[in-house]
Image (cartoon, grey):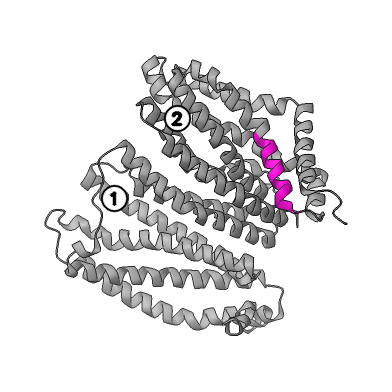
């Protein structure tokens, strides 16, 4: 097949297709958010409602909840396309696979990561965070959640051909999330001490830049293995 | 070099190479292990502060070093397998992974056994302990991914990709954990400086490290032989081998 569309058009087509599909089944967008909210609700119930304790633990809780709810949506990124065969078409097409993979990962972030960032002020209220900490939480979520999508999609691509890939995927991906968790929570911690946390954000940004370049390649080769 | 390596892409030649190498590795490992352990556990002088309980380093340090060494050799094999599409390298990845995981477990267990009398706790959230634990998770991830696939051909490739992703992440994890620890708690555990250790303890330690490396080699060779036989069981040369007994 001759490439008759520009790469940009392909990117937009894949991205819009995934978004349209997600908006037709709104549960896909709402469920991870609800899960995020419920996990956060569980913590005050489990450790006690003292405001000081909560605001001390808030960064960790919010970030662990974010990790877990990203995992929920990950299985869906390639699963439906794998089942209906459109993934095979993307691989067989004359367009570079990493490009369509990039579009799909960004679509996943738009569906699961972005709503989490937007809802973060509400969660911050629940966890008794002040504005200063809220800004830090928002910024780390904004840089960190796409990173989670990129790393997680590698695991999703590796396990897409397996019948029960979900749990295995979390086992593969969660250890790789540790650096993101460490830097994100430490940025929020640092801001709670009124110190500059630009360094942590810069490292998160650097990791995002590396992941945005490398992860699509890894995902593509993983998809080729899974589909073959 | 390619001309020299190329024959070993064939499973049969690789199997024969394993057979040739195995006796040398076995003799070397047994000799080194016996010398290293007897010297280290019986003859090396006791530490002036930790008394005899320091002797666990003769097992702990080699296994910790080899746990990381095995991961890097696994990742190198994975890169070779993916770049040059060598199936034997894939099998090597699968052969090394459980050995490395076992080394990691040994390092963690002996470390805990040493930590209890020295630090008063089985486990401390120290940077090195944490990254060793994460290393174990990465090994287990590669193993469980490999065993989850029905088709062993794609299983090998998927495990290779994961091993490479892991090796890129390993330094990031290591440094982030180190950084996390130093940020939260000031207390750090004194590092072993090789120059700060007395030669009477250093030599048995070095011999033990070499012995453990040989041990990893022996077990990997045996596992690689088995993997090759299992993967190639429909081939005539394997049938000949079996019928000859």
Q: Which residue is mark 1?
A: B113
Which quarter shows the C terminus of chain B?
Answer: bottom right
Q: Nearer the viewer, residue B67 or A177?
A: A177
Residue A107 in percent (x, y) is at 70, 37
Side of A19 relative to A62 (left or right): right
Part of the protein shown in magenta = A96-109
Q: Is residue A47 above or below residue A64?
A: above
Label 2, residues with CA under 10 Å away: few <14, some 14-19, many ≥20: some
A71 relative to A124, above or below: below
Mark 1 falls within which chain? B
Is A100 in the magenta? yes
Which residue is tagged 2?
A60
Q: Secondary structure at mark 2?
A: helix
Mark 1 lies on a secondary structure that is helix
Residue B67 x, y percent position in the rendering? 41, 60
Location of residue B12 by image quarter: bottom right
């Amino acid at each position: 097949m001759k490439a008759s569309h520009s790469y940009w058009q392909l990117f937009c087509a894949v991205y819009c297709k995934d978004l349209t599909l997600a908006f037709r089944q709104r549960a896909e967008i709402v469920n991870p958010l609800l899960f995020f909210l419920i996990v956060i609700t569980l913590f005050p119930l489990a450790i006690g409602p003292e405001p000081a304790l909560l605001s001390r633990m808030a960064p960790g809780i919010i970030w662990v909840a974010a990790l877990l709810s990203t995992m929920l949506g990950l299985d869906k990124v390639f699963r439906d396309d794998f089942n209906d065969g459109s993934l095979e078409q993307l691989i067989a097409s004359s367009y570079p696979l990493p490009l369509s993979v990039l579009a799909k990962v960004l679509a996943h972030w738009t569906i699961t990561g972005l709503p989490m960032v937007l809802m973060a002020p509400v969660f911050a209220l629940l966890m008794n965070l002040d504005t200063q900490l809220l800004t830090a939480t928002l910024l780390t979520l904004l840089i960190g959640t796409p990173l989670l999508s990129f790393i997680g999609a590698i695991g999703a691509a590796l396990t897409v051909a397996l019948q029960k890939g979900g749990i295995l995927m979390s086992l593969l991906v969660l250890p790789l999330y540790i650096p993101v968790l460490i830097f994100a929570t430490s940025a929020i911690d640092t801001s709670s001490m009124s110190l500059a946390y630009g360094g942590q954000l810069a490292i998160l940004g650097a990791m995002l830049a590396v992941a945005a370049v490398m992860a699509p390649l890894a995902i593509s080769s993983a998809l080729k293995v899974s589909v073959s | 070099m390619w001309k020299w390596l190329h024959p070993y892409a064939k499973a049969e030649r690789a199997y024969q190479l394993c057979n040739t190498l195995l006796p040398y590795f076995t003799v070397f490992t047994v000799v080194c292990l016996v010398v290293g352990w007897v010297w280290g556990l019986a003859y090396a002088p006791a530490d002036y502060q930790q008394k005899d309980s320091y002797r666990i380093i003769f097992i702990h340090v080699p296994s910790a070093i080899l746990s990381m060494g095995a991961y890097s050799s696994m990742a190198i094999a994975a890169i070779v397998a993916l770049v040059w599409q060598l199936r034997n390298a894939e099998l090597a990845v699968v052969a090394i992974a459980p050995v490395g995981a076992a080394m990691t477990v040994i390092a963690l267990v002996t470390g805990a056994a040493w930590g209890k009398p020295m630090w008063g706790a089985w486990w401390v959230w120290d940077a090195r302990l944490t990254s060793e634990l994460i290393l174990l998770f990465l090994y287990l991830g590669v193993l469980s991914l490999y065993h989850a696939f029905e088709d062993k051909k794609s299983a090998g490739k998927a495990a290779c990709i994961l091993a490479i992703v892991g090796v890129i992440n390993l330094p990031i994890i290591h440094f982030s954990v180190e950084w996390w620890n130093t940020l939260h708690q000031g207390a750090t555990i004194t590092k072993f400086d090789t120059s700060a250790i007395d030669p009477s303890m250093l030599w048995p330690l070095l011999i033990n490290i070499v012995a453990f490396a040989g041990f990893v080699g022996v077990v990997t060779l045996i596992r690689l032989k088995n993997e090759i036989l299992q993967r190639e069981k429909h081939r005539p040369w394997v049938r000949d081998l079996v019928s000859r007994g």
